[in-house]
Each structure stands twice: as structure tokens, then as C-alpha cells.
Amino acid sequence: MNTPARLRAWLFTGAVLALAACDGPQSALLPRAEQAEAIDRVWRVMLWTCTALYIVVLLALAYAMLRRRADRRREGIASDPLLRKTLAAWVVVIVAFLTAFVALSYAEDRRIRGGEPDLEVRITAKQWWWQVEYLDADPSRQFTTANELHLPRDRTARIELRAGDVIHSYWVPALGGKEDLIPGRTNAVWVTPRENGTWRGQCAEFCGLQHAHMALDVFVHDVGFFERWRDTQLYPARLPETATARRGKAVFEQHACATCHTVRGTTAGGRLGPDLTHFASRRHLAAGLLPVESPHLLAWIEDPQRLKPGAQMPAVPLAPQDLLAVNEYLLGLR
Amino acid sequence: MSSRCLRASVGATVVAALLACGVAGCDRERREYRAAPAAPGSERPRLTDLQPGGTLAQAPSATGARYEGNAYHINQGSRWFRSFNCNGCHGNGGGSMGPALMDDQWRYGGTIDQIHATILDGRPNGMPSWRGKLTDQQAWELAAYVRALSGNVSKAAAPSRREGMAATPPLTRIKPQPPQSSDPSAQNPPPP
């Protein structure tokens, strides 16, 4: 392959990779919530204005270059009143546009941070997963889940953001901008989703070894479906049905699992790791690492450090039959 | 066969059966003259220095030495210390219901092996046994952090910042306090 052809191949690959990032469940260019649309509008205004101004600059540059070659008599002229006036006018234009951008951005930013929320959720980011608490004035209607955010369409949710250990950043590109989660400080974002679907969020602030494996699945449903989901989540854990699963429950409660994990309705009440009450209803385990399926879960319980080195969950030594039992028990927690 | 002959053979059978039972009963209990030696390194740490005769030093475990010199493991220990509510009784190392961990007094020994054993086995009057509820590695990390609280780990490895409220200077700056007698009540005269 000769050099230009190789260069073209590289450019093509680069363009494909760059454009591939513009689609899918994690794209800021496909806004699916009111707040994301506002940010998108501001961004488009800035993009097209800057593009137009840049074209003007390029045209001016081209004119200067052409004129320089055609008119050699102008060499050595130190002062040019017309040029000075044009540059001064250009500075005024730039400052005016920048001021307009700041004003627009400020106004939109104020607008998307507020509103009467229909739903309050608290997200606490931890190394390396998301704890999601659904708040309610009635304490019996509150519950905790992990790594999944379910929202009703066309309803405004206020999402309170906290950090459990180090600085993280909440970013669901399809539903709105980034917001940092800072230890000792409470931030909030407002989300009004406009379309049903499954989106993906990602920690956007380097937070340690497994920063890359810290994803958040976001589901937007109809209000009715959301209410049913919420009512299901409020139930304590399902009782194990098979003998193996019953054994798994006993192992889970007696061994180190229960030191960190909660399964509501059992004696397992640890608050350190994710709440596993309805674990099998989730799409992914370990913050987007793997789908919740038998071989993956089994491998995860056996040695989390092989799949997510540095994760806070240690490999708990369990006998092989206990391992299988815990696996079956957890997969029954729908 | 005559009835006499029959009776004699029944008698002989009974006698033979009794003899067999008697002989079977002659197997005396087993005496184990030589127990299998304990695997090297599986020795459990002593809880007290008080020993009959000359003091026999115990070799410290390599695991403990490794964890004591490792900043990551000490920091993980600090995380577990808060997460598993050690603060509930030991109050950030200052002690409340449980004994203080930032001084040089140790009821059950202050070496990392002894602290590791204390965490896993539990101790009378309140210290729960965490065996099976923590992994062995977590216990080592906790023990390394507890050692750091009294300044007994390498300055290069001690955490320079604390996550919670702290009543002491950073752990890198406190004076090392080597463990004193492991059981002061056993060696000091009782209080008047």
C-alpha cells in the first residue's frame, strides 16, 4: 500500500470511530430530555455562530494572502487606518458574541436547574458503583437500589448527588450535562425525560482504578410502568424457591456477603456494597461490567478481582457447592 | 441327632460366640505416640508475654510485615475500620466502650499477628469474632491500620490524611509507641 492510500485508510478509520461516538445510548448529540435539549440548543447556537465567524476569518485571511501577492507596492507601510478600524470593529463583534454566549449559557443553566420536582432520587457515587435511593415523604415508600436509574417520562426528577469516598461525576449524555459529586457537598440535577428508552451514564471524573467500569443504566418508562416498577422494588426480597437457593440464602446470611450487602427481608443488612434485594431484575452487575447471567455472576462471586481488579469486593472463600447455591439464590432475587 | 448331642453343639456355639465377643473387646484404645507436627507458620500468636521460664520469642509472620509496609493496604484498612463500625466501640482509635488503639497498652498483644488474631477470634467482654464475616486479607488490612494508629508502621506507608474527624495529628507525624507489656494486669501489681 502506498503512503497516500495508507493515510486515507487511517483517516477513514478515524472518521468512522469519531462518528460512531455520535450515536447510541450515550450521546450528547441526541438529547432525550428537556434539560439536554436546552444544552443542545445552546451548543448548536455556539457551533453555528463560531463556524460562521471562522469562515469570515478564513475569507479575510485568503483575501490578505491574495492581496499581498498582487500588490507589492504596499510593502513597508506601517499604518493603515482602514485595517485598524476593521480590526477594532472585529474585536467589538467578538466581544459582543462572547457576551451573548455567556448570557445565553447563564440563562439556560439557571432554567435547567430548578422546577417543581415530581420525584426525588438520591445518587451516591462510590468506588466504583452508583447507589440509587428513591426518596419519599413517607419513609415506607423509600428504597435503595444500585447502578440503575428508572425515571418516568415527562415528569421532572430532582436527582441529588453525593459522593461516598472521592470525587466522581454524574454524566448521562442523553439526558443532560455533567455534574460533579463531591464528598461533603450535595449537588443536584433536574431531569425531565421526553422519550422512553434505555440510556447509559458514565462516571466522568477520574476516580481510581476502575473509573472506566462505573456505568449507570438509565431507563425511561411511561408513568404507569414506572409506578409498577417502583411498587415491585418496595417489596422485600423474594423467598428462595428451590433447595439450592435456600441453601444459598443461608450461606449468604452467614458468610462475609452479609457484612457488606443488604437483602431486605433477610438478616443480611450490610450497608457497604450495593443493595441486592432485587438484584436479578437489573441489567448489569458491577456497574455495567457484565450482564446479570449465570456464568458471569458465578465468575464474579468466585473472584471479583479477576474481573474488576481493585474493586472493593473481596473474593470470599466459599466451597464450590456454596458458590453455586449463592449464585442460584441471587439469580432468584427478581 | 440325639437331643444331647444337639444341646452340646448349641452350648459350644454359645461359648464360641461369647469368646468371640470377649476377644473383640480386647482391642484397647489407640495411643498416638507421635502427633503430626503442626505445619510451620500455622502457629497461633501468643496473647500474653507471660511465659513459664525463659521468654520464647515468636517469629512474626511475613504477611503482617508486608501489609504493615504497604500504603494501599493500610488505607484499605482505614476504609474497613469505618465501614465495619470499629469506630462504634474504638472511637477513631481513641476508645470508648472498647479500648483505645492509639496508645502503647495492649490487652491481647500489639503485634500485627496478635491484632489480626484478635479481630478474627474476638476477645472477652465485647470484641466480636469476625472470622468468616471478613476475609483474611481484610483482617490483615485492618490490623495494619490499627498498628498505624499508634505510629507503628513505616512513615512512608502511613496515611497522611484521615477520612473522618481526627483528634490526633496525621498518622505520619505521630510518635511511634511500641507495644508495652501485652497484659499489664498480669504483670503489674493490682491497684490498691
Image (cartoon, rainbow, N blue to C red):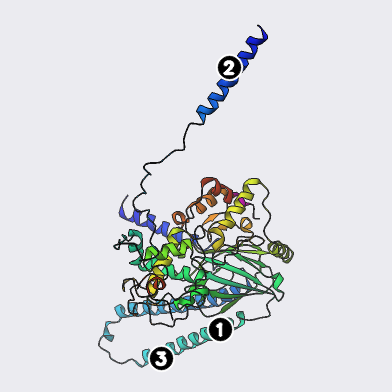
Q: Residue at x 53, y 50 (%)?
A: A298
Q: Which residues are magenta?
A: A328-334
Mark 3 secondary-structure assignment: helix
Is A89 included in the stretch rendered in magenta?
no
Mark 3 → mark 1, Cα distance in angstroms:
24 Å
Circle on res. A104: 1
**Residue under disc 2 on the same chain as residue under disc 1:** no
Mark 2 secondary-structure assignment: helix
Residue A175 to residue B45: above or below: below
Quarter occupied by the C terminus of chain A? bottom right
The residue identified by callout 3 is: A88
Q: Residue at x 45, y 59 (%)?
A: A17
The residue identified by callout 2 is: B12
Mark 3: amino acid: Ala
Mark 2: amino acid: Ala
Residue B152 to residue A225: above or below: below
Which label lies toward us, 3 or 2?
A: 2
**Residue under disc 3 on the same chain as residue under disc 1:** yes
| Foreground residue among A328 and B134 | B134
Circle on res. B185: none
**Residue under disc 3 on the same chain as residue under disc 2:** no
Q: Position of residue B161 (x, y in %)?
A: 40, 77
